[in-house]
Amino acid sequence: MGCFLGLDPGKDQSYVLWGLEQENLARTRFPIGKFHKSDIRKMALDSGFPELASKGDSYEICFIPDNDYRGFLKRKEPETTAKLAHGKLVSVGGTELGEHDGYPFFTIGQRKGLGIATGEPLYVTEIKPETNTVVLGRKEDPDRQSMWVRRPNFQKIDALNGDIEAVTKVRYKDKGTPSTLKMDGERVKIEFHAPVRGIAPGQSAVFYDGDDVIGGGFIERENQASMKKTGYFALVTFALVIAFSACKKEDPPIVDLGYGYFPVKVGSWIEYQVDSMWRNDNAVPEPLWDSLSYRMLERVIEEYTDDEGRPAHRIHRFIKNDQDEWVIRDVWTGTHNSSAAERTEENERRLKLSFPTRNNRSWDMNVYNTDEELEVNYKEVDTPYALNGMAFDSTLVVRNKVGPNAVNKRNFDERYVKNIGMVQKYWEESNTQTTYPIGLPPQVRVEGFRLDMEMVAYGQD
């Protein structure tokens, strides 16, 4: 028996199942693992359950309704959290930068809510529970080339005998990095083939061979053989670090500018031409190349007030089948306030626009989910643009701010038209690995995808 990646990459749970042993796997079944969530929604709609089909996706920590895990810890362990107040914030070199309310309120790679201003972006690079110290460094400081994993459990193999190659994920939404695994006593050393950011001690590291889960373990703190965590408070803290990526409140509004780029009106619709292609040179038994073209329709179905008291709207997304009929694909939701506009897409909460809209204003589109950082900024604000024979007076572009490197490529552009919404999208991500077999030419393997969307029509019912 084994554990494998799910069919729907956006809902895959293999990362959290590495701890299951063969005895557990032999008695475990995943009845909807062969479906996408959109398929399940369509089944519910076809079976006469429209409310279930359009039910909003859940996110954050389900057992903390207000998403305030800091407040949860303070309520559950007031004496312990009080003792942890006035901890030290220090630089990588040891210079004291300020104080904090307790190390459990920080995660590796965190860049917001640090409580200090230094004139340059700083990130949490290390957490030292024994001294209640949080270490801050520049963006390049958190990258690591190797790490240690304790308490490993293997599913695909009985034991790790000798070095093996694998793809290692260090967080739930991590795409994984090629690596070499080496057993050393009761621990595993992972040597990455490219630098990895945001390695969090106590978090799970999971090893993959293609779609197969080889196994996993707990990431150790750098230069320490084990993490000493005892008591109920440490258990709760660990669980929250596993479950929670970020829960940040929006900044207060600055000016009422640019809201027209995110219009919401029940009955409004946009039709897109969608072209996608993907490539996986690592597929078994042979490399996979494929492409897909189709028409998509997004329609605003209703407005409502969400659980946080914000105006929200529900969007039905349809695709045109071979019979030229519109078939519902999935249901998304959106919300906005005076400082930001969000959409929940494929169960991922994304910060689409930040107000006011002005050139070079930047933000992290993935600040509310567990995906890796996607830093974007505005370009070409309030400029005219023509698309498919349609001319528009005021448009803007949301663009990925960080350029690609030799291994990983990420290009992301979305264009918005005032009083219409998003009219164009280009998204490309790929990972390129080059090996040099003895006596053979270099072997280049690429895995990635490309998505192009363009509005072809819009209107109001």
Image (cartoon, helix red, strand yellow):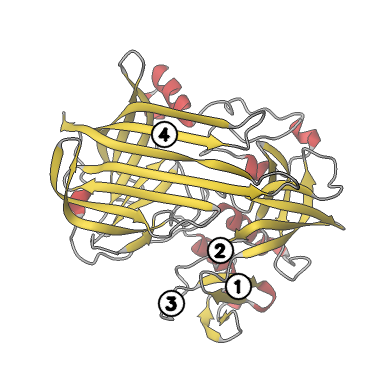
Is residue 269 visible to us here?
Answer: no
Residue 21, compared with residue 220, is above or below; it is: above
Q: Are marks 2 and 1 in contact (CB under 8 Å)?
A: no
Q: Please, what secondary structure does the residue beneath circle 3 have? A: loop
Is residue 449 visible to us here?
Answer: yes
**Marks 1 and 4, how far apart in space?**
54 Å
Which sits in the foreground, 384 or 356? 384
Is 46 on the left or on the right of 158, as rendered?
left
**Marks 3 and 1, how far apart in space?**
34 Å
**Marks 4 and 2, how far apart in space?**
45 Å
Foreground label between 4 and 2: 4
Q: Residue at x 63, y 49 (%)?
A: 434
Residue 55, compared with residue 404, is above or below; it is: above
Residue that mark 2 sits on:
73
Residue that mark 3 sits on:
120
Lower position in the chain sequence, tag 2 or tag 1 = 2
Residue that mark 4 sits on:
276
Residue 461's spot in the image, x, y percent?
16, 28
